Amino acid sequence: MTSSAPLVLVPNYVAQSYPGGGAGARFRGLDRSIATSPEDWIGSVTERFGQSGIGLSMLSDGRSLRDAVEKSPEDFLGPEHVAAFGDDLGLLVKLLDSSERLVVHAHPNRDFAKAHLGCAHGKTEAWIVLEARPGAEVYAAFTRDVGRDELRTWVDEQRVSEMVDNLHVIPVVAGSTVLVPAGLPHAIGDGVLVLELQEPTDFSVMLEQGQFANGDLGLGWDVALDCVDRDGWSAQRLAGLVSEEGSRSGRLLPVEADAFFRAALIRGGEDQVLEEGFAILVVTSGEGKLGGAFSGAPLSIAKGDTILLPYGAGPVKCLGDVEVIVCRPPVPGASSPARPLL
Ligand SMILES: [Zn+2]
């Protein structure tokens, strides 16, 4: 018998300036009025940029997950993770649902974040599309080399159509996945519900400023634009980041993601055992149970539920007619790919 049981995570809506479409609440089986934001940060130890305390997931005992992990890192993360990363969880998972195209932006990589933001993490991210309206699209990577002065002009003069017109357009359906390396300019289109895995920061450089006053992270644009990958990407190179059809089981993201996070789709069954280790589980369809040697009764799960699996819960069996996306922190020892990724 182990001491730690799976923890059910309640929605953690973190205010944003763009409107949601209600898909996040529907996915969770909640009334739309409860979803006060299009972003639900799941198992978050991350604060909104410049807003202390905002964004942290709270546990039923009143502690923040961040405090709980800092107090018992081995129990949550396991010895191998702690040996590699200390008590740094290394992962943020979000449900993100937008009723409009999000602004064009980019995120710093680890080297930039260390040099300018005092943080070991940048914000490589990945999208797993859970729902998409017919014709839905996302945008990533410039189609041609963009000069530094040209990009600066687009930002200064907010030439949004030029930014968007020079990005690759990626059609998406439910099941599509896109890995977005730090630095790559990108935007999620309207009518898409994504499960986003990312490094645990809130660093965004808003090329398209919309309502964002602090789009340069307070660094000044001369510095902030250094984090943007201005290279033109060929369609072939971009294809290495995208799965348009989506995987129906097993690994969901390319191996290049392993230094940042991992995701796998599993189905319930007698032989479906999740190996011990920290994970955030997102139930995407059906109903089932999680069982194991952990304390307490097996846990009933259903579509829309989100569960934190601490290392201390041991191996967990997933039973029933249920599909679950298993999100995990980076692989200890996986090296951070040198830029450019792929
Ligand atoms: Zn982003």
Image (cartoon, grey):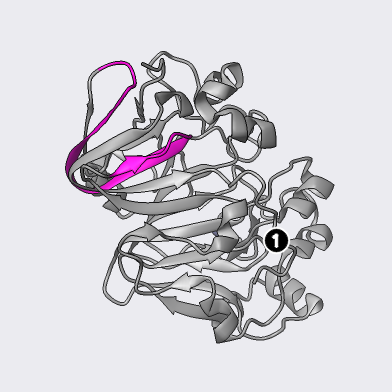
Please name the residue shown 22% across and 44% down the image.
303
In magenta stretch: residue 212: no
| Closer to the camera in the image, 36 or 47 | 47
Membership of 275 in magenta stretch? yes
Q: Is residue 323 left or right of residue 120?
A: left
Residue drawn at the location 63% of the way across and 41% of the way down:
49
Give the vertical position of 190 relative to 35 (above or below).
Answer: below
Q: Position of residue 323 (x, y in %)?
A: 25, 50
Identify residue for label 1: 337
Inspect this view and state whether residue 79 appears: yes
Asked if 234 appears above or below 221 in the picture, the reply is below
Q: Label 1 sits on what residue type?
A: Pro
Residue range of the region highlighted in magenta in the rendering: 272-296
Query: Which quadrant of the view contains residue 129?
Result: bottom left
| Vertical position of residue 114 compared to residue 125: above or below | above
Callout 1: SS? loop
**Ligand 1 found in image quarter:** bottom right
Residue 161 visible at all: no
**At which x and y percent is residue 338?**
75, 63
Could you say which is closer to the camera, residue 50 or residue 29? Answer: 29
Image quadrant occupied by the C terminus: bottom right
> Where's the N terminus, which quadrant?
top left
Q: Indicate the position of residue 241 as horizontal and vertical percent values.
A: 53, 71
Left or right? Give the position of 96 relative to 237. Answer: left
